[in-house]
C-alpha cells in the first residue's frame, strides 16, 4: 500500500501476563532518522527486537522492508543492520575478525568483506586497533565496532537500541557524529533512547513511549511546541519550609508547573518575566535557572515523570 | 550459496586458530588411557572374551571402547560447557541471530563443529590403533563413521540438555553423568562381568551402543544387532538437535 | 607476612562451599568410588578371574591407595586453577578480601588450607567405602589420610601460585591434559611402575603423585618401608614449602596493586 520501510499497526508484545508493547501504530519512512524515546521499561527494546525479527510479534501487524517478520525473518535480517543494547561482539576474536565473520553470517564473499572491513574500521576510527582482541577495547570503541559490524552488509535500515547508554560524554559525541554521517549518506536510522539530548541531536521524527504506549509523535521541535512552553524556570530550595511555601503560592496562580524531588519547574513563554513576578509574590528560591524547553519537559508534561529515574 | 549454518562452523574454526595448542592436547587423553589401562593394566589382565566369544588381548578389547568414549567426551564438551558459555555469557548466538541465521542454523552449526572436532580426534585415535596393531579387521575403517555417529548422538543430547541449564553449577550433573558412562559402558571390561539384571540396564545406556558398535567393527564381528545400536544413536542425535533448535528459539528470541 | 587471618579466608571458602559442595564431593569421593567400581572391581575381576595378585595383594587392594592419592591430586588441581582465576579476575573475591585486614599471603594460605580440609574429608570417606569393599588390608590405613592431604597440598600450593600469575585460563586445560592426566595414569595408580620400560621408571621420582601413591599404598596394604616413606614425605613437603613461598609472592604481587 505504501513504501514505508517499517509499519506497525496495533503492534503488541506480551510476555505471559506482562504487556510490554500495548498496540502501537507507527511508520518509518525511507531516509529518515526515527526515534523511540522513553524511560526504561517503556517497551522500546521489545519494539526494537520485534523490528529486528528476533522476537515474535504477539498481536497486531508489523511489516519491515515490505515483508512479514514472522515468515521472512531471515530475508529481512539480511537487509538490516542491528546494534543491540548490550554489545554482542565476539570476545574471542580480534576487531577485524569480528567484522570478517559477521560478514560471513550474511553469506558475503570473503574479498568483499575484507574490503568493507577496512573501510568500516576507518569509518569508526579503529584501523589501528584492527589486530587487537575485542576484550582489550574501551566501552566506546566496542560500541563503535558494533556499529561498524552492523554496516557490513550495507543495510538500508540500521536499528540502534540505546546506542550510547553507558558511554562517557566524549565517546557519546563520537558515536553521534558517526551516526550523523550515516544519516547524511541516506541510511534510514531507527533508534531507541532515554536521553532527550540524543533524540534531539539525531532524530528527524520520534515517538514518545510510556508504559507500552505511544503518548506523542512528531519532530523534536513540533513536540516541544505542542506539549511544552518555550522556556522553563527551574527553582531550587535549601529549606523544605521555603519550598512548601513557594509551592503553595505557585499553586494559587494558574502557572503550569511540575513539582519534582529536587526542584520545581515552571513552564512559561518568558522565563525572566516569570521570575520577576514570582519574586514580587514572595517566592525566593536559593537558585534560579531559566532555560529552553527540551524533550525531557515534553515527557514530564505528558506523564508527570522524568525520563531517567 | 552454502548453507548458512556452515558459517557458524567457520566462526569456531576462526576462534580456534589461536588455540591450536589446546586443540592438539585433545588428542592426548584417549591415547594416554590406552597406554595406561590398555597396555599397562592389560599386562596384568592378559586376555579377555571379545565380541565374537573368542579370547582377545586386553588392549585390543579396550581400544574401541576408548574410541567410543573419546567421541562422546569430545562432542559433549563442545556442546555443553562451550555452548553454554557462548549462549549465556559471550552472547555469540545473539550476534548470529541478528543476521540471516536462525536458531536452527545455530544449533546445526554448533553441532557440526563439535562433530568436526570429534571426527579429527577419532581419526587420529583410529590411526594409532592401526599402527599399534590393535585392529584385526578391515571393517575397522567403519569405526570412523561410527565415531561420528556417537559424536552426533551425544552432541545433540548435550546441546538439548544445555538449553535447560541455569548456571555453571548445573554442569556438575554433566560430569556426574559422563564419568559413570565412561567407566561402566563395557568400555573397560565385558558386559558378562555384570550380574544378569545389571547387564540389561547397561544395554539401555547410550555409550554402550557406541562401545558395542565400535568393538564389533574393530574385530569385524558384524551382526544384525548393530543396526539397533545405529538407530538408537541416530535417534538420540536427531531428537536432541530438534529440541535444541526449539529451545534456542524460545531462549534467545523471547 | 600472612598471619592467623588465613583462618578467616578458610571460613569464607567454607561458606561459599555450601553452594558448590557438589563439585568437591564429585572430585574427592564420587569419582574415586566410580573408578574403584570400574577398574578395581570390574577390570580387577579380569586379573586371573579376580584371583590374581599385583605386588602380592589383590588388584582391588592395589588400586585403592592409588585412587585415594590420585583423587587428592585431581580435586586439588581442579580447585587451584579456575576458582583462583575467579578470585583474582572473574569475580574478584580476593580483591575484596585484601581490602580488609586480611593480607594477600593470608588469602593464598587460606585457599590452600581449605583444599587440604576437603581432601581430608573426601579421603576419609573414600577410605571407609574402600574398606567396605575389602580394598583395605592394614590397620595402618588411617595414615593414608594425612598422606592424601599432603599430596593435595603438593598440588594445591604450586598450582594456586601458578594460577595467581595468569591473566587468562588458556593454559589451564593444557595443565590438566598434559600434566594432571598423565600423572594420574602413570604414577603407579593402576599398575606397578615396574611394568614401565626400565628407562622410564626413575622418572616416577619426579611425579609428586607417585610419592603420594607410595605413602598411601604403604599405609593401606601395610607394606610401608620407613626410609623410603621418609623420602616421599620430605619430597612432598619440599614441594609444598616451595609452592607456598612462590604463591605468597605471586599473590602479593597480584593483589597488592
Image (cartoon, coloured by chain):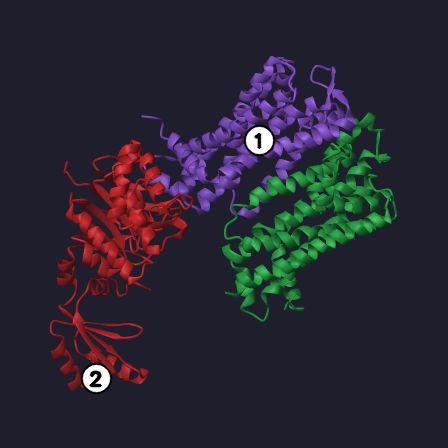
Q: Are marks 2 and 1 in contact (CB under 8 Å)?
A: no
Specify the chain shown as green. Answer: C
Q: Is residue C239 left or right of residue A28?
A: right
Which quarter of the rendered picture does the C terminus of chain A lie within?
A: bottom left
The alpha-carbon separation of the residues under discs 2 and 1 comes to 79 Å
- The hue used for chain B is purple
Chain A's colour is: red
Rendered location of residue B214, percent (x, y): 61, 21
Residue projecting furthest to the front: C199
Image quadrant for the N terminus of chain A?
top left
Is residue B175 found left or right of B49 in the rendered image? left
Judge from the rendering whether residue C203 lies leftward or rightward of residue A176; answer left or right. right
Badge 2: chain ID: A
What residue did someone put label 2 on?
A283
* Relative height, residue C99 to residue C129 (above, below): below
For discs 2 and 1, the disc positioned in front in the rendered view: 1
Judged from the image, the secondary structure of the residue bearing numbered disc 1 is helix
- How busy is the neighbourhood of tag 2: few (under 14 within 10 Å), some, or many (20 plus)? many
Residue at 20% over, 76% down: A289
Could you tell me residue A151's position as x and y percent? 26, 42
Q: Which residue is mark 1?
A: B72
Residue C197 drawn above or below residue A19:
above
Which quadrant of the figure has residue B253? Answer: top left
Which quarter of the figure has residue B141? top right
Residue B195 visible in the shown view = no
**B97 and A51: which is toward the camera:** B97
**What is the quadrant of residue B38 in the picture?**
top right
Position of residue A282 measured from the top left corner of the image (x, y, whole percent): 20, 86
Amino acid at each position: 500500500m505504501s513504501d514505508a520501510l517499517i509499519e506497525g499497526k496495533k503492534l503488541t508484545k506480551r510476555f505471559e501476563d506482562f504487556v510490554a508493547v500495548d498496540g502501537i501504530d507507527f511508520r518509518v519512512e525511507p531516509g529518515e532518522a526515527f526515534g523511540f524515546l522513553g524511560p526504561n521499561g517503556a517497551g522500546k527494546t521489545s519494539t526494537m527486537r520485534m523490528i529486528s525479527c528476533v522476537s515474535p510479534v504477539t498481536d497486531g501487524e508489523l511489516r519491515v522492508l515490505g515483508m512479514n517478520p514472522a515468515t521472512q525473518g531471515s530475508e529481512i535480517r539480511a537487509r538490516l543492520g542491528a546494534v543491540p543494547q548490550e554489545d554482542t561482539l565476539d570476545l574471542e576474536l580480534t576487531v577485524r575478525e569480528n567484522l570478517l565473520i559477521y560478514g560471513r553470517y550474511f553469506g558475503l564473499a570473503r574479498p568483499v568483506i575484507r574490503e568493507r572491513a577496512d573501510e568500516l574500521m576507518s569509518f569508526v576510527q579503529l584501523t589501528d586497533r584492527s589486530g587487537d582482541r575485542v576484550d582489550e577495547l574501551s566501552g566506546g570503541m566496542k560500541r563503535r565496532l558494533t556499529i561498524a559490524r552492523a554496516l557490513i552488509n550495507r543495510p538500508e535500515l540500521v536499528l540502534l537500541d540505546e546506542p550510547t547508554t553507558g558511554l562517557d560524554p566524549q565517546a557519546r559525541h563520537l558515536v553521534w557524529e558517526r551516526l550523523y554521517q550515516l544519516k547524511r549518506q541516506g541510511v534510514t536510522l531507527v533508534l531507541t533512547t532515554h536521553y532527550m539530548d540524543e533524540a534531539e541531536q539525531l532524530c528527524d521524527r520520534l515517538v514518545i513511549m510510556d508504559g507500552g504506549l505511544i503518548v506523542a509523535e512528531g519532530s523534536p521541535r513540533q513536540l516541544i511546541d505542542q506539549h511544552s512552553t518555550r522556556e522553563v524556570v527551574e527553582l531550587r530550595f535549601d529549606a523544605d519550609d521555603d519550598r512548601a511555601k513557594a509551592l503553595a503560592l505557585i499553586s494559587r496562580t494558574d502557572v503550569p508547573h511540575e513539582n519534582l524531588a529536587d526542584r520545581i519547574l515552571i513552564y512559561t513563554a518568558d522565563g525572566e518575566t516569570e521570575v520577576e513576578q514570582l519574586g514580587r509574590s514572595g517566592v525566593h528560591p536559593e537558585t534560579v535557572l531559566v532555560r529552553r524547553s527540551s524533550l525531557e519537559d515534553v515527557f514530564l508534561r505528558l506523564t508527570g515523570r522524568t525520563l531517567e529515574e | 550459496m552454502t548453507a548458512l549454518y556452515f558459517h557458524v562452523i567457520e566462526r569456531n574454526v576462526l576462534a580456534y586458530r589461536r588455540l591450536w595448542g589446546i586443540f592438539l592436547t585433545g588428542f592426548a587423553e584417549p591415547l594416554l588411557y590406552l597406554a595406561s589401562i590398555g597396555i599397562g593394566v592389560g599386562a596384568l589382565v592378559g586376555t579377555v572374551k571379545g565380541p565374537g566369544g573368542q579370547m582377545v588381548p586386553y588392549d585390543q578389547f579396550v581400544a574401541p571402547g576408548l574410541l567410543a568414549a573419546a567421541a562422546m567426551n569430545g562432542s559433549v564438551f563442545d556442546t555443553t560447557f562451550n555452548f553454554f558459555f557462548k549462549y549465556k555469557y559471550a552472547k555469540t548466538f545473539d550476534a548470529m541471530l541478528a543476521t540471516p541465521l536462525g536458531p536452527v542454523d545455530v544449533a546445526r552449526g554448533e553441532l557440526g563443529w563439535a562433530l568436526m572436532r570429534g571426527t579429527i580426534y577419532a581419526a587420529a585415535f583410529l590411526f594409532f590403533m592401526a599402527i599399534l596393531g590393535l585392529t584385526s579387521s578391515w571393517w575397522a575403517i567403519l569405526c570412523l563413521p561410527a565415531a561420528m555417529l556417537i559424536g552426533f548422538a551425544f552432541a545433540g543430547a548435550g546441546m538439548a540438555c544445555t538449553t535447560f541449564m541455569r548456571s555453571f553449577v548445573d554442569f556438575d550433573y554433566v560430569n556426574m553423568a559422563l564419568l559413570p558412562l565412561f567407566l561402566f559402558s563395557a568400555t573397560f571390561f565385558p558386559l558378562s562381568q555384570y550380574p544378569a539384571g545389571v547387564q540389561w540396564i547397561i544395554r539401555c545406556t547410550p555409550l554402550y551402543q557406541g562401545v558395542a558398535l565400535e568393538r564389533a567393527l574393530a574385530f569385524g564381528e558384524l551382526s544384525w544387532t548393530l543396526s539397533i545400536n545405529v538407530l538408537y544413536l541416530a535417534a538420540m542425535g536427531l531428537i536432541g538437535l530438534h529440541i535444541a533448535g526449539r529451545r534456542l528459539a524460545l531462549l534467545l528470541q523471547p | 607476612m600472612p598471619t592467623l587471618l588465613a583462618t578467616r579466608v578458610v571460613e569464607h571458602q567454607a561458606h561459599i562451599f555450601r553452594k558448590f559442595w557438589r563439585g568437591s564431593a564429585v572430585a574427592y569421593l564420587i569419582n574415586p568410588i566410580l573408578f574403584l567400581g570400574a577398574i578395581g572391581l570390574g577390570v580387577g575381576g579380569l586379573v586371573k578371574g579376580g584371583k590374581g595378585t599385583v605386588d602380592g595383594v589383590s588388584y582391588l587392594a592395589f588400586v585403592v591407595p592409588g585412587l585415594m592419592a590420585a583423587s587428592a591430586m585431581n580435586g586439588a588441581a581442579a580447585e587451584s586453577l579456575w576458582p583462583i582465576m575467579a578470585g583474582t579476575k572473574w569475580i574478584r573475591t580476593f580483591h575484596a578480601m585484601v581490602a580488609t585486614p586480611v593480607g594477600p599471603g593470608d588469602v593464598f594460605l587460606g585457599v590452600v588450607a581449605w583444599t587440604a580440609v576437603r581432601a581430608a574429608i573426601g579421603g576419609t570417606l573414600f577410605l571407609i567405602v574402600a574398606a567396605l569393599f575389602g580394598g583395605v588390608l592394614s590397620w595402618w590405613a588411617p595414615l593414608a589420610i594425612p598422606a592424601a592431604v599432603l599430596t593435595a597440598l603438593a598440588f594445591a600450593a604450586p598450582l594456586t601460585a601458578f594460577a595467581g600469575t595468569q591473566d587468562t585460563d588458556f593454559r589451564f586445560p593444557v595443565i590438566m591434559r598434559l600434566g594432571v592426566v598423565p600423572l594420574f595414569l602413570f604414577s603407579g595408580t593402576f599398575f606397578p611402575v615396574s611394568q614401565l620400560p626400565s628407562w622410564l621408571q626413575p622418572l616416577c621420582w619426579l611425579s609428586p603423585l607417585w610419592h603420594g601413591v607410595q605413602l598411601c599404598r604403604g599405609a593401606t596394604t601395610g607394606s610401608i618401608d620407613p626410609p623410603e616413606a621418609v623420602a616421599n614425605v620430605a619430597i612432598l613437603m619440599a614441594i609444598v614449602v616451595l609452592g607456598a613461598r612462590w604463591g605468597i609472592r605471586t599473590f602479593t604481587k597480584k593483589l597488592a596493586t
